[in-house]
Image: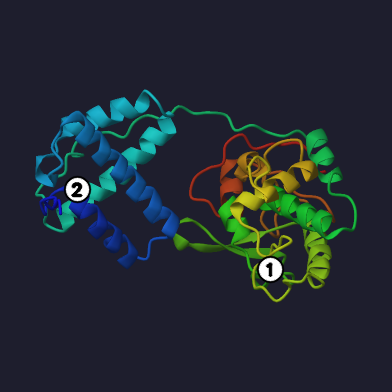
Amino acid sequence: MKTTDAAPVDDLTTLLPDWRRHLRALNRSPATIKSYLTCGESFVAFLTEQGMPRAANAIAREHVEAYMVALSERVSAATVAKHYRSLRQLFRWLVEDGEISRTPFERMSAPAVPEQPVPILGDDVLRKLLDTCKGNSFENRRDAAIIRLFLDTGIRIGELVGLKVEDLDFDHDVAHVMGKGRRGRAVPYGNRTADALRRYIRARARHGQAKSPALWLGKKGPMTESGVKPDSGTARGRRWRPQAPCTPVPAHLRPCLARRGPPGTGPHAPGRMAKPRDGRTLCRVSGRRSRARGAPTRGAW
């Protein structure tokens, strides 16, 4: 039987599984771990293809820069920056664990990511979007609640599908979401969204999977991210498409369309949402650590 020699202990192919265990020990989210490891494996594949060293202590700045240049020729600047950050974390761990004495990222600067305006949906489009969900069917009530919660809070799609029924606080009109880095926060929503959520909860109580803790249900059980995205190739994605034909909601309605100000500030008339005064207001409302870009300033719908 043919045998192959095991990779040296300092080879990145040997070290990546140990990095995965380290990230798990730090209680990093599965999505974060997968993203980090994907970038690490891509870097190893590049080094192998180019005949460059894979031993951790032999990898130099020039190898990292060559990888970044190669990446920039086929992916976006934002993706290149993501790989840079992920690999920087990898080599920081290698230093901390004593595998190498210095990281090749010393004195390296992160790749620049050009500012790109976030597409904004106008009030007319938003009204048409919500009009597609008029009706009393289970799907209509669910989709109307999803769209309004997106618009009011600017939460991420992963945060939305991760909601449980118990995460809704109707006494204070807030949803408790688990964000990036497993940081929980409470996001407020307006009166119309609260009404849409209550209408959905009543319809949900008659669903065959009503005992599931997940807030959002499809025909066969809890919805996933692919079930919410209108441009996915899944059956759920196709079912969503007729309900929301205007645009892929999650991609465009994150912090840029969160319009509601924090409780106790601004003109919170029934059924209306306050206009954000600036980027910091949106950031505070949605619980983000960075400013939202391209925030709309038009009236409520």
Q: Residue at image x 34%, y 31%?
A: 111
- Front one among 133 and 44: 44
Question: In this rendering, would 136 be left or right of 290?
Answer: right
Q: Residue at image x 74%, y 61%?
A: 219
Q: Which mark is residue 168?
A: 1
The image shows residue 144, relative to residue 44, as above or below, that is below
Going by the numbered disc 2, the residue's amino acid type is Leu
Residues under labels 1 and 2: Cα distance? 44 Å
Q: Position of residue 281 (x, y in %)?
A: 60, 47
Classify residue 243 by image quadrant: top right
Q: Position of residue 155 (x, y in %)?
A: 61, 52
- The single residue placed furthest to the right in the displayed view is 135
The image shows residue 74, relative to residue 242, as above or below, that is above
The image shows residue 180, relative to residue 67, as above or below, that is below
Classify residue 98 by image quadrant: bottom left
The image shows residue 214, relative to residue 111, as above or below, that is below
Report the residue marked by disc 2: 12
Q: Position of residue 101 (x, y in %)?
A: 9, 49
- Is the C terminus in the top left, top right, bottom left or bottom right quadrant? top right
Q: Which mark is residue 280?
A: none
Q: Position of residue 261 (x, y in %)?
A: 68, 51
